[in-house]
Amino acid sequence: MNIKAFIPTRGIGGYLAVAFSALSILLTVILVEVIGLSAAAQLKSNIGNGLAELALQTSDKLDRGMYERYREVQLMAQRKDLTSQETSIDDKRMVLDARQETYHYYAWIGLVDPQGKVMVSTRGMLEGADVSQRPWFRNALQGINVGDVHEAVLLAKLLPNPTSEPKRFVDVAFPYEDKSGRVQGVLGVHLSWQWAREVEQSVMEPIAARRKVESMIVSTDGTVLLGPANLQGKKLAQQSVRAAADGNGFAVEDWADGHSYLVGYSKGKGYGPYPGLGWTVLVRQDVNDAYEPVRRIQRTVLGSGIALALLFSVAGLIGARRISRPMQDLAAAAERIQRRESAEIPVEHGTYAEVRTLAGSLNALVSNLLQKESALKELNQTLEGRVEQRTRELEHALSQVRANEKRIQTIIESAQDAFIAVDLNGRITDWNAAAERMFGWRCDEAIGRTLVELVVPERFRGSFADAMRSFNETGQTGLLGRRLERIVVNRKGDELPVEVTIGLAGSGDTYFFSAFLHDISERKKVERMKNEFISTVSHELRTPMTSIRASLGMLAGGFAGELPPDTRELIDIAHVSCERLVRLVNDVLDIEKIESGNMEFDMRAQPLLPLVEQAVDAVRGSADQMSVRLEVDCAPGDVLVNADHDRMIQVLVNLLSNAIKFSPSGSAVTVRVECEGGKVRMSVIDRGPGIPAEFRERIFQKFAQADSTDSRQKGGTGLGLSICKSIVEEHGGRIGFESDAGSGTMFVVELPGV
């Protein structure tokens, strides 16, 4: 619905009128709804509680009535004139008949001996009959004195029945005893169920016809014992029957006849010594009949609300027109200014203070607008010029960006090395021509696929996936900006070695890895040929060099007799040089074994201190010659490592020899053993000149020496530290160093502890 259609002028008066009317109607509806809901809820609760109260009264009256019968039968069982053997059968029958006359709902009263034979009863019915199998007899002997409702069995044909309904009884029975306390039999009473109907009618009749209320008595298993004819004897599965176990209350339920009922319920709990039979009393009323008072109240409240809304709407319309008149005059003056018919808004003294203030402000605003109109036109022309200039600058910058992108793409495509870009999910985003030649995959085939399925060999794919996952979780990796040697596979499945440099580019969500790959197959081939040549030469040299060293050793040891001093000096020089050559050959052979993977390790768990002591003893002679002290600082207790005995001594001897060689005379070299965080840490510390800064990056490379000139003062092959590094890494550890110029050097070996 279009509200504006009902406001011809679309002025503030019309809007205020509509607003006041809408607000009045809204508030009235809310008020009516709140009052109606509150009253309806309270009234529904009162009606439901009224039915629950009826159920409670009926249940209580049933329990009290049963209590009276229960107590009366119990007292009868204690009467001496009934239970004494001295009283004749006729006298006992007279007493029972007299008791039956006092309460006509006693359908049958009888005395039964312990064997279940009826000795005497009212009007002689069932005398001599065997009732030993009847539940009330057996239960009485077991201390259960009340039996639930049941149809007559033995008395069905003996008692008069003016109605077509079957006779039903509630049983009450107590055992009776002699003077010594022995059970002599059972006094049983059949209480007519008609008693319960009269109790129910006494409570319900005053309101049943007026409110169309029905009541039911339900047994513990849900069977209707007393109620409407169409439900009597049937089992109910209503929630109210189950809820009654928790106390009295009410509920709205759908019943099997298709109607909804408001049901009040209460469950009997006995009275006094009477334990009760667990009967549940239901009082139901059709929900439409029950809640008819609620609907009457709602209709009354709604009618009153509509009348109030109309009254408030009329009052709002009148008030809105009076309030809006000064604003309408102000709007008319503003329209005249817009048509250039006037340059000022008249201010009337009889109007609202707000309207006068607004008129004055509008007059000032109009004056300012007229003054600034020309300035805005001039400013607009200036801004248009600036926008045009800025547009040209942006177009120029964009063309430069595109040119740079094209230049970078040209450089990548013309590069001799393969270039691959990979996103953080491992998918290829760029693939240059060199990559096509190296791997055999075209660019359109490679882009979008994962790097691992195209170039990573099967055996390395797990570690590659772990590295990518680690970077995505931590944002850190040690592979960036370094030259790395890796094995890749081409389209044919051939593996080839490459040298790769990885970088991280982009920002935010556009980070990607850039990798340049250089095929080093030829270089590896040359290195392999070089290593094979060195290995061959070393093997060929070691045998004669060993013989020469042994011969020179015997000559130096005087095996051939006393030699002249000059000859002995030459022999010593030759022996020392031969020792150096043998060490060189052994180092070269060790390097070759390590690189070819043929070096064997006998790994055993063993204490570290004996290894340190053997290594110190091995270099003690050279330390004495250099006047260098050897110190051992070991952590208390046995420090165990899993290591190869000979190879670990080789590492320590090499580190100690280097430390002695570069230590000044009179200084000390310290070997320190520590345990830290499950790691064993060995440190060899000297007080020498330290390692030059320019040599530190290649100190573990083969044939690397700080002083590589022909005139160097310190001997050595430059292979020792490279061999040490390989041996330590084969043990699952790492080797490093700390050095300050002029303050000495500390080499550190870390091994896994045992």
Image (spheres, grey):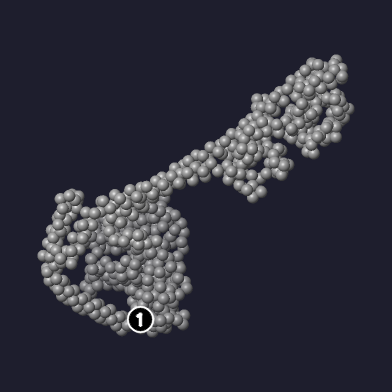
Mark 1: amino acid: Asn
Residue 260 located left or right of residue 33: right
Q: Whole-percent x and y of residue 246?
A: 59, 37
- Total marks shown come to 1
Q: Residue at x 38, y 53 (%)?
A: 677
In the image, residue 75 sits, relative to residue 558, either above or below, namely: above
Residue 596 located left or right of residue 51: left
Q: Residue at x 18, y 64 (%)?
A: 336
Q: Quadrant of residue 214?
A: top right
Q: Whole-percent x and y of residue 37?
A: 47, 44
Quarter of the figure with the C terminus? bottom left
Q: Whole-percent x and y of residue 736?
A: 32, 62
Residue positioned most to the right: 128
In front here: 209 or 695?
209
Q: Whole-percent x and y of residue 751?
A: 39, 58
Q: Is residue 558 visible?
A: no
Q: Which residue is mark 1?
A: 432
In front here: 447 or 196?
196
In the image, residue 77 sits, relative to residue 619, either above or below, namely: above
